Image (cartoon, grey):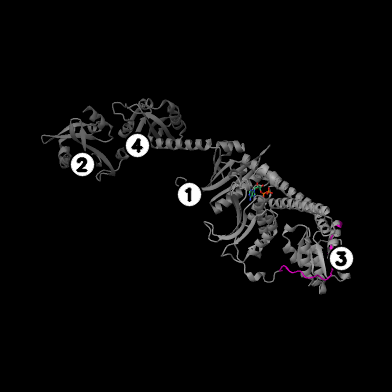
């Protein structure tokens, strides 16, 4: 029962515990406040509440009842009846809760005493009234309840309060009290005070003193409010704020926040380190107060744009420090701040991270890439210049050897001259490979987009390599898929180059059996349109599985002994791969050691109308006897001049040599020529400009046949040559057959 009494004492309102025994209600316990109110719980009270008590007892459910009491004033209560389980059986707890509604007795006049009582009764806080002269204090019940103290435990002296104030708070409460009593400063202080149970509660004490004529305080009255909950909530908020701050401080990020006026409100540790400006210097200030004006100005512009457009701004920023530069990846975002009781405001959250290391390596990488690209460009330029320089005399060697072959030679001489010509052609092939590769590597190779006949290209390739195959006793078979379009768009020259390379390899690495050159239409997976698939299959030595992956890399050959046996540079397949790729296709190979290989490549299919090729220059198959022509040859290189003169003279033509473009334009106006053979690269004026100048003369010059002689067949300059008004082009070294064909075509 003692426990129940203690529990009841903890209630802030009068409370009684009752039990029904043999149809009689007996009081099991009542708390101090009830004792103060009634002394002993009265029979009259029991009669009034009997029906509700019964209801609660019988249904085990809580109920309530209004009650009004008159005791100098009218006080309204709600009586709450709750079922209560005790160790020895059930009981009903009745406690009285005053309602806030207090009305003044109509019969009485307002007077101070009544009002004071009402205020004391209605106040949520405790009330005290301290007589400073005799040190007696009136403490209201609420005040005692806050402290959890009974009237007996809380004497009517000020000391009863002071001895309970937390030692750490005593001084500032005393200072505040003296400030009020002596200097009339407002008395409003928060402190901790010990309850009877031994723990501390937070209270807010306010008061107003009364002073005598000499200015001595004689009385102090005021209120005490329990603010423990508020303090606890405040402490929790502060702790959470501290936690968030320490998390933001621990981040290797600069984080700071500006309010609606641009004043810094938050500034983390990393920002202090990065800027060298402490939190104390920064908080409450604008950028203009802490940063150099240009920096503050540019920050302000970004902030203004953000406030206008919203969203998030992320950018890389370069910051110049005294002795080094720092790169930051910085972001800004609008935050909506809700001040207590005020309108929401737009604040700006800024965050940034040091990316100097990454940026420096990026810059270094970029510089290295540029240097590497420059080196590749330089290499490619060097190679193309060198190969051009080498090709010119080589053309003379091959051409002269060809001329010699047609002259009267004995058998031994013929073998030697043939050797010279073959070696020259081999060397030219190597130079062409190197030149092609360097151009492809430097991305300088242009792809043509012209209509051509697929069958014709296959035919040309097979005619070129057929003697090689026949010499080795190999069969060369062509296969053209059934549904193939006749004419397609593409770069016939590059296609031929790839096919020639693959077919020559197939012949080179096959000793018996057959070579199959095939083109079909294939529809790759995940692609709606079919593609052209060319393949070259052989029954040769095959390729070991572990070497297949390297085949298309430059300078790669299956093994040294193979290389020695078969020769080659290892550039051919690398060139094929790059050529196919710039034409938009893919390459691949499958092979079985000892059984043969199949090299294939795909090209995008773009069908062209066959009528586009109706007006093309058709090869003249049956060469008729050519009537002698007067030909103007533009050529700056003396040995080439010699060679071309010899070839043309041998073909019974009259030859005039001009050593540059200016001379050509001059000569054509002085005499009449049947045709001009125009070198492309010449000093003073090149072939293109000379042609333009001749065509610009108009009249008969407009129809004068001009055939370009280009040293670099792969330059893809057929388009350029035709666009300035030339009629045809021949590549060097000059193929006598092709030259004859062209002369016949354009002289007729
Ligand atoms: P090259 O033939 O000038 O050495 P390629 O790049 O054309 O250079 O070929 C690289 C290597 O691939 C060759 O040296 C050879 O070892 C291998 N190879 C190419 N084609 C075939 C083939 N049809 N059969 C067997 N091996 C081949």
Residue segment shown in magenta? 617-638
Up/down of 169 relative to 251, above or below: above
Q: Residues within 10 Å of mark 4 (few under 14, many from 20)?
A: many
Up/down of 719 relative to 375, above or below: below
- Along the line of sight, which residue is nearer the eye, 405 or 341? 405
- Callouts 3 and 4 close, C-beta under 8 Å: no
Element marked by disc 3: strand
The residue that mark 2 highlights is 61
Decide if residue 632 is on the left or right side of residue 122.
right
The residue that mark 1 highlights is 344
Q: Residues within 10 Å of mark 3 (few under 14, many from 20)?
A: some
- Along the line of sight, which residue is nearer the eye, 67 or 446? 446
Q: Is residue 618 magenta?
A: yes
Extreme-front residue of the structure: 411
Say which label, 2 or 3, has the lower sequence index: 2
The residue that mark 4 highlights is 125
Residue at image point 63% right, 64% down: 455
Quarter of the image with the N terminus in it: top left
- Callouts 1 and 3 close, C-beta under 8 Å: no
Element marked by disc 2: loop
Element marked by disc 4: loop
| Image spot of residue 286 (x, y percent) | 59, 43
Extreme-bottom residue of the structure: 699
Up/down of 420 relative to 663, above or below: above
| Image spot of residue 722 (x, y percent) | 74, 66
Q: Which mark is residue 681?
A: none
């Amino acid at each position: 029962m003692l426990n129940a009494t203690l529990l009841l004492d903890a209630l802030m309102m009068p409370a009684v515990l009752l039990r029904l025994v043999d149809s009689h209600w007996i009081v099991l316990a009542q708390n101090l406040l009830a004792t103060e109110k009634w002394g002993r719980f009265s029979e009259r009270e029991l009669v009034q509440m009997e029906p509700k008590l019964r209801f609660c007892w019988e249904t085990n459910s809580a109920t309530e009842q209004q009650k009004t009491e008159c005791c100098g004033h009218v006080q309204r209560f709600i009586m709450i009846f709750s079922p209560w389980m005790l160790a020895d059986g059930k009981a009903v707890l009745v406690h009285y809760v005053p309602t806030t509604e207090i009305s003044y007795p109509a019969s009485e006049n307002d007077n101070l005493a009544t009002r004071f009582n009402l205020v004391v009764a209605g106040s949520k806080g405790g009330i005290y009234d301290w007589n400073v002269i005799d040190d007696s204090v009136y403490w209201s019940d609420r005040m005692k309840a806050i402290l959890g103290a009974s009237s007996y435990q809380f004497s009517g002296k000020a000391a009863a309060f002071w001895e309970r104030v937390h030692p750490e708070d005593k001084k500032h409460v005393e200072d505040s009290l003296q400030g009020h009593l002596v200097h009339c400063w407002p008395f409003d202080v928060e402190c901790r005070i010990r309850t009877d149970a031994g723990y501390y509660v937070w209270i807010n004490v306010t008061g107003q003193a009364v002073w005598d004529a000499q200015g001595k305080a004689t009385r102090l009255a005021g209120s005490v409010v329990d603010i423990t909950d508020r303090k606890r909530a405040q402490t929790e908020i502060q702790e959470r704020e501290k936690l968030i701050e320490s998390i933001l401080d621990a981040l290797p990020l600069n984080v700071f926040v500006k309010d609606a006026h641009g004043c810094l409100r938050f500034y983390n540790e990393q920002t202090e380190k990065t800027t060298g400006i402490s939190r104390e210097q920064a908080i409450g200030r604008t950028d203009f107060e802490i940063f150099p004006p240009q920096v503050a100005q540019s920050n302000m512009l970004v902030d203004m744009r953000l406030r206008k457009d919203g969203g998030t701004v992320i950018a890389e920023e370069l910051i110049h420090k005294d002795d080094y530069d720092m790169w930051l990846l910085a972001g800004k975002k609008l935050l909506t701040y809700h001040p207590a009781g005020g309108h929401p405001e737009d604040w700006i959250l800024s965050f940034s991270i040091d990316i100097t290391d990454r940026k420096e390596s990026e810059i270094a990488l970029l510089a290295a890439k540029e240097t590497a690209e420059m080196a590749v460009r330089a290499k490619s330029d060097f190679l193309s210049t060198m190969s051009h320089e080498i090709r010119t005399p080589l053309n003379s060697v091959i051409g002269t050897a060809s001329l010699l072959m047609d002259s009267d030679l004995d058998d031994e001489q013929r073998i030697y001259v043939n050797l010279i010509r073959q070696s020259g052609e081999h060397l030219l092939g190597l130079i062409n490979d190197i030149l092609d590769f360097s151009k492809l590597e430097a991305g300088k190779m242009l792809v043509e987009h012209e209509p051509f006949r697929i069958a014709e290209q296959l035919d040309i390739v097979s005619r070129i390599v057929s003697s090689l195959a026949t010499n080795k006793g190999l069969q060369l078979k062509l296969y053209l898929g059934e549904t193939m379009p006749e004419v397609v768009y593409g770069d016939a020259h590059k296609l031929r180059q790839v096919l020639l390379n693959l077919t020559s390899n197939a012949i080179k690495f096959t000793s018996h059996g057959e070579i199959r050159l095939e083109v079909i239409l294939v529809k790759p997976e995940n692609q709606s349109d079919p593609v052209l698939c060319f393949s070259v299959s052989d029954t040769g030595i095959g390729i070991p599985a572990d070497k297949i992956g390297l085949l298309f890399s430059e300078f790669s050959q299956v093994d040294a002994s193979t290389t020695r046996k078969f020769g080659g540079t290892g550039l051919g397949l690398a060139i094929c791969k790059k050529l196919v790729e710039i034409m938009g296709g893919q390459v691949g190979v499958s092979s079985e050691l000892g059984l043969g290989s199949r090299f294939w490549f795909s090209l995008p299919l773009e069908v062209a109308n066959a009528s586009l090729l109706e007006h093309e220059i058709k090869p003249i198959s049956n060469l008729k006897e050519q009537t002698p022509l007067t030909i103007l040859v533009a050529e700056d290189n003396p040995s080439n001049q010699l060679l071309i003169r010899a070839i043309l003279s041998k073909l019974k033509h009259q030859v005039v040599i001009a050593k540059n473009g200016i001379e050509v334009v001059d000569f054509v106006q002085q005499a009449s020529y049947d045709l001009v053979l125009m070198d492309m690269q010449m000093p003073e004026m090149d072939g293109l400009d000379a042609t333009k100048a001749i065509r610009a003369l108009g009249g008969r010059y407009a129809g004068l046949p001009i055939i370009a002689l280009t040293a670099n067949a792969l330059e893809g300059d057929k388009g350029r040559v035709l666009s300035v008004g030339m009629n045809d082009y021949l590549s060097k070294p000059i193929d006598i057959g092709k030259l004859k064909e062209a002369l016949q075509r354009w002289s007729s």
